[in-house]
């Protein structure tokens, strides 16, 4: 609500597949149509939901693969869209590993070798800590409203819930890796339900499912985000938000290379 791929046993938060796709070309009922400006505002709300103006949270990430399962405890800070810091607290072997984003620059700190590495743009799609989340997911480098054109592709009842489904198409030269994205949002409270990510051939690559909606620091948010790769259906990575504080009083000086190495 950051880096060069991390070398871990398998390989290095934040905000996609559902069952039914809308029928192409089917017009929306006139009374239910959402204007382009309204659609963009809804998607912006989702984009900023777990971030806010500034935020600080405690997160547990569970990674399940066909070969192993592991749990990682993390602490995360963010300021707007341009500043993020993620630090691993446990397990002990990875404790202190951290990722920093400042504007378009991203660095990774590896405490075992006491080394800071700048992440190239091409590395943003790489796995973070052997999970099914990428660096881009973790530090929210891309933005659904800045980097994509937003279009309502379905509006109405689906499986007993009134929803919007938005199709997000990358703008020219946008720094994104997906051919397009589909976002499903619940109407009554504007909570995201799932996001589908498609590659540049139009094939579904992965799905993120949002659940466990709770009020944290006065804001209703999904506290569980689970990523499911399409080519490995038995695998998943789930992020559990255990504590989340908004308007955390951070400023840009907090997000420094020294803090990346030494901690808060």
Image: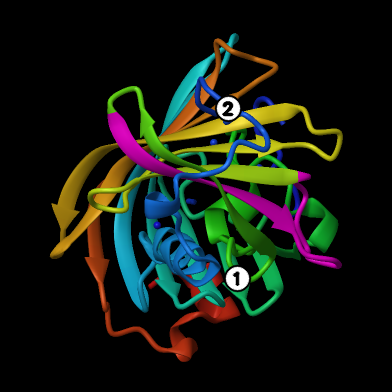
Residue 13 x, y percent position in the rendering: 48, 51
Q: CA distance from mark 2 to mark 1?
A: 35 Å
Residue 165 x, y percent position in the rendering: 49, 43
Task: Name the residue located 64 percent from the left edge and 80 percent from the top edge.
Answer: 103
In this rendering, position of residue 162 left or right of residue 76: left
Secondary element type, mark 1: strand
Q: Is residue 69 above or below residue 155?
A: above
Dividing the image into 4 quarters, which one contains the C terminus? bottom left
Specify start and end residues of the magenta stretch as a single range: 161-179
In this rendering, position of residue 209 left or right of residue 21: left
Name the residue carrying label 1: 101
Residue placed furthest toward the front: 30
Name the residue carrying label 2: 21
Q: Nearer the viewer, mark 2 or mark 1?
A: 2
Dividing the image into 4 quarters, which one contains the N terminus? bottom left
Q: Is residue 105 above or below residue 180?
A: below
Q: Residues within 10 Å of mark 2 (few under 14, many from 20)?
A: few
Task: Name the residue located 36 percent from the left edge and 76 percent from the top edge.
Answer: 54
In this rendering, position of residue 184 left or right of residue 168: left
Upstream in sequence: badge 2 or badge 1: 2
């Amino acid at each position: 609500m950051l880096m060069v791929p991390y070398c871990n046993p398998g390989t290095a938060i934040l905000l996609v597949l559902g069952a039914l796709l809308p029928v192409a070309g089917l017009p929306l009922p006139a009374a239910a149509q959402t204007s382009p400006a309204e659609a963009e505002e809804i998607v912006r709300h989702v984009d900023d939901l777990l971030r806010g103006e500034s935020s600080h949270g405690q997160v547990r990430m569970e990674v399940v693969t066909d070969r192993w399962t592991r749990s990682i405890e993390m602490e995360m800070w963010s300021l707007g869209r341009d500043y993020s810091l993620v630090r691993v607290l446990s397990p002990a072997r990875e404790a202190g590993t951290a990722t920093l984003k400042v504007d378009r620059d991203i660095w990774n700190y590896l405490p075992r070798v006491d080394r800071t590495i700048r992440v190239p743009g091409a590395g943003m799609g790489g796995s973070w800590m052997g999970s099914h989340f990428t660096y881009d997911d973790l530090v929210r480098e891309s933005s659904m409203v800045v980097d994509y054109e937003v279009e309502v592709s379905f509006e109405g009842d689906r499986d007993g819930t009134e929803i919007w489904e938005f199709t997000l198409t990358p703008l020219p030269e946008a720094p994104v890796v997906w051919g397009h994205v589909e976002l499903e949002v619940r109407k009554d409270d504007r909570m995201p339900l799932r996001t589908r990510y498609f590659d540049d051939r139009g094939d579904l690559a992965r799905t993120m499912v949002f659940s466990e909606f709770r009020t944290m620091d006065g804001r209703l948010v999904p506290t569980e985000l689970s990523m499911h790769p399409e080519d490995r259906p038995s695998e998943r990575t789930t992020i559990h938000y255990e504590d989340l504080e908004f308007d955390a009083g951070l400023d840009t000086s907090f997000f420094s290379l020294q803090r990346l190495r030494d901690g808060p």
